[in-house]
Amino acid sequence: MSEINNTSPTSLTFNRRYEIATDGACSGNPGPGGWGARLLSWDGSVLRRQPKELSGWQEATTNNEMELFAAIRALRFLKNRTIPVTVKSDSQYLIKGMTEWREGWLARGWRTASGEPVKNGELWLKLYELVEHRDVTWTWVKGHSGDPDNERADALAKRALARFLRGER
Amino acid sequence: MSEINNTSPTSLTFNRRYEIATDGACSGNPGPGGWGARLLSWDGSVLRRQPKELSGWQEATTNNEMELFAAIRALRFLKNRTIPVTVKSDSQYLIKGMTEWREGWLARGWRTASGEPVKNGELWLKLYELVEHRDVTWTWVKGHSGDPDNERADALAKRALARFLRGER
RNA sequence: AGACACCGUCUAUC
DNA sequence: GATAGACGGTGTCT
């Protein structure tokens, strides 16, 4: 009996984690763009609440900007930094920028391997900031290959973009 | 009347000039390569004839070799040495080699500033020969930045290379 | 250290 | 067909 009670306080958050799926869209590239994110809050294997869906548009942007922006907005929404997060995206630009490329950029003073300035610096910095003191796992999924969360994020981004193009601001 | 006639013989060629745009391509570098050149013959501000386009490929070469080779072939094609020529290229290697570096190479006995032998010596000598007793202006244009002649020469070089790679010799 | 060019690869957006 | 971005490299010179 006491053993069960002893484990109880930690188990309150022990199994909690967030799962985020993000995607970006851009008509023209550069051009008007949209972003979408689907956020799941898990407790073990059960959803703690309704999935949260975020989306938005930007008048003049690029495909990659929208991919980064979707992740920023999703992470910014999840304020509790003690709960681990997994971010899923079909953008290797986003995933590798947050994992393997980061170190080299810092070491080279925000230059790419070929000496050019790294693009979208402000967005990268914002992401690095959002990831500080937080357990975030970045995983890549192939686009349009059946992952339901990715497809949903894609739909959200495209819908936001379509709404903007139709003039519904 | 006689004044008009007096100017007539010289005015026949006075306003004539050639404009050449050249480019090179090389798959792998070193590897198989292609070159392209577009030649315009101007009389004042009017084209004297259809632009002439030259191109070709080489089985094993370098990017720089192809840049030089394109200029050689274009200049060789224009036999009348009394007509001034402007050569446009996005290769600083070609442009500077024909202008600012030439003197130093000669003074050092075909050594670079760091003492190494100058590469592609035969091609440079061929170019210097083609430029003798001839008014040639060398101008650099940034690659892929919208210059139509440069883009055309680029397309010619790439097309020649693609044809070679497809086996159409 | 700098400059220009030439590729090779990958993903996404149109 | 084209753009947005990153990685890896070579060919050449100052």
Image (cartoon, coloured by chain):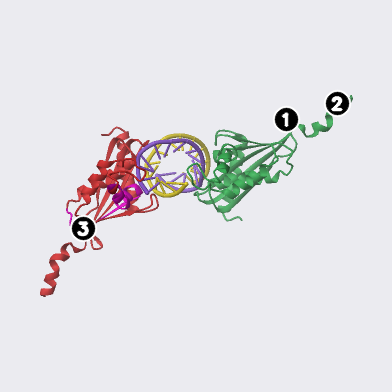
Chain colours: A green, B red, C yellow, D purple
Residues drawn in magenta? B80-106
**Residue at 28% across, 37% down:** B58
| B4 vs A104, nearest the viewer | A104
- State yes or no: discs 2 and 1 in contact (Cβ < 8 Å): no
Q: Give the percent coordinates (x, y) of residue D13.
A: 35, 46
Residue identified by numbered label 2: A4
CA gap between label 2 and label 3 equals 96 Å
Numbered badge on residue B48: 3
Three-letter amino acid code at the position of disc 1: Ser
Q: Give the percent coordinates (x, y) of residue C5.
A: 37, 45
Say above or below: B96 vs A90: below
In the rendered image, the quadrant that contains the C terminus of chain B is top left
Three-letter amino acid code at the position of disc 3: Arg
Residue identified by numbered label 1: A45
Q: Nearer the viewer, mark 2 or mark 1?
A: 2
Residue A125 shown left or right of residue D5 in the figure:
right
Circle 1 marks a residue in which chain?
A
Q: Nearer the viewer, mark 3 or mark 1?
A: 3
